[in-house]
Image (spheres, rainbow, N blue to C red):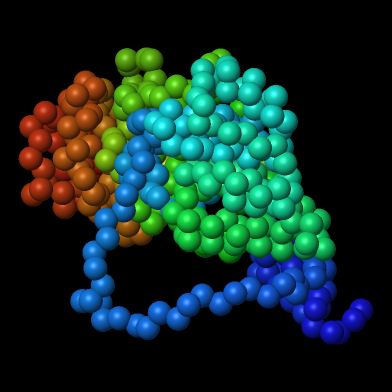
Amino acid sequence: MKKNGKNIFSCSECGYQSIRWLGKCPDCGGWNTFIEEVISRVGKKAAPFSPPKRISEIEDEEFARTPTTIGEFDRISGGGIVYGSLLLLAGEPGVGKSTLVLTIAGKISMQGKKVLYISAEESSNQVKMRAERLGIVSENLYILSTTEMTFVRDALEKLKPHFVMVDSIQTIFDPELPTTPGSVTQVRENAGFFLNYAKTRGCSIFLVGHITKEGIIAGPKVLEHVVDVVLYFEGEMKSNMRILRATKNRFGSTMEIGVFSMEENGLTEIPEASSLFLPDLKNTLPGAVIFPSQEGSRTILIEIQSLVTPTYYGVPKRSVAGLDYNRASLVTAVLEKKLRFSLNSYDVYFNTGGGLRIFEPAADLAIAMSCISSLKERQLIEQCVVMGEIALTGEIRPVSQVNQRIRESGRLGFSKAVVPEGNLREIREKSAQIYPVRWIKEAMDILLKI
């Protein structure tokens, strides 16, 4: 192997670089993921020097946005797409990424903006067929079907669009780089070109990205660092429900989610999603607890389900779907230590109704009560929501935005709420009967009357 400093080895999973080949990546732990790549010899022009300024001398600049008229997307982005921003959308194959991006392109082009849709995975006829199915008819929407960066640069210089959609960044390749399409170098260099073009021309660019089998965005980690917004499009393949979630947003909140339904004519917005994940049954069943999840400015009521059943193996099974596995393990450990429940001879299954994922610690108390309810085969009191973070000591800690959670729960017919005692002073809502609890034992006595 030549040691001329022109070759480098990059991990195809995380982008870690080394001057020599390694069997195991020291960053992500992947085996046999290093591939040899040639460093580009093309020199880049240096940006003009800008002397440092006092922070008081910097003028305030308000971001100019273009609303897409898609309410659920505008909720995520903070009101629309910012001029000169670089956005990255990732998701499972077949979840509807291309449909979402093409819908956004059509909505923007109908506002008189010039939009270039670069399709590196489908032909122009395929994109047109999808556009007709979505009802997109606009003279300002241009389609370019190519995989070569040379043609992309020419099209950008000739058309000078206001918005660019790239589907997808992993299939675009630059023939000047002696590496295969989708390699770390290709993705990094091409993303760098789009970043520079977006910032210097004031053009907003939407990149569609693939994800690996582990659920992370394929390519180097620098791809997520350089973009302004990272969006994940989630959904079960056998369900029409789709969730759009922002994990990074330089121009807005990362706590909001957008809810869509995949129909024959495209994506349909679901602005009223508060009760979408609630069960149809009016009577409370053992092992089921209603938790008011707070997703940014939106409260969504979700049923947390548990099933505790005797194990037939030497080691009891723990299965978690839709919840943080570590938080669920913490809750079961607190139940064993503080309430003397022996779960070492039971298999425990946790699930969320509707497939929505919950990551906030405020769901701890609901998880614990559903587990005890299934273990004792006792149903909770009816029309009651449960919220609270459980400490390792068994104490129930306060949650955020408690008034909004109670207000939305009362609007949907839940007249009772178990809340942490620490939230009692800030509660102003009178729409529900409040049960303040400080310890997990108090919550169990109120909800299950054991």
Is residue 66 visible in the rendered structure shown here?
A: yes
User: Residue 227: x percent and y percent?
Assistant: 50, 57
Q: Residue at x 35, y 37 (%)?
A: 67
Q: Nearer the viewer, residue 415 or 151?
A: 151
Q: Residue at x 92, y 79 (%)?
A: 1
- Quarter of the image for residue 39 reads bottom right
- Quarter of the image for residue 403 reads top left
Q: Nearer the viewer, residue 82 or 235?
A: 82
Is residue 317 visible in the rendered structure shown here?
A: no
Q: Nearer the viewer, residue 127 or 352?
A: 127
Q: Residue at x 37, y 15 (%)?
A: 281
Q: Residue at x 21, y 45 (%)?
A: 401
Q: Is residue 110 above or below residue 157?
A: above
Residue 95 appears left or right of 297: right
Residue most extreme to the right: 1
Q: How many marks?
A: 0
Q: Nearer the viewer, residue 248 or 437?
A: 248
- Where is the C terminus found, in terms of image quarters? top left
User: Residue 393: x percent and y percent?
Assistant: 32, 60
Q: Is residue 65 above or below residue 239?
A: below
Residue most extreme to the front: 158
Q: Is residue 239 above or below residue 72?
A: above
User: Residue 56: x percent and y percent?
Assistant: 21, 76
Residue 149 appears left or right of 445: right
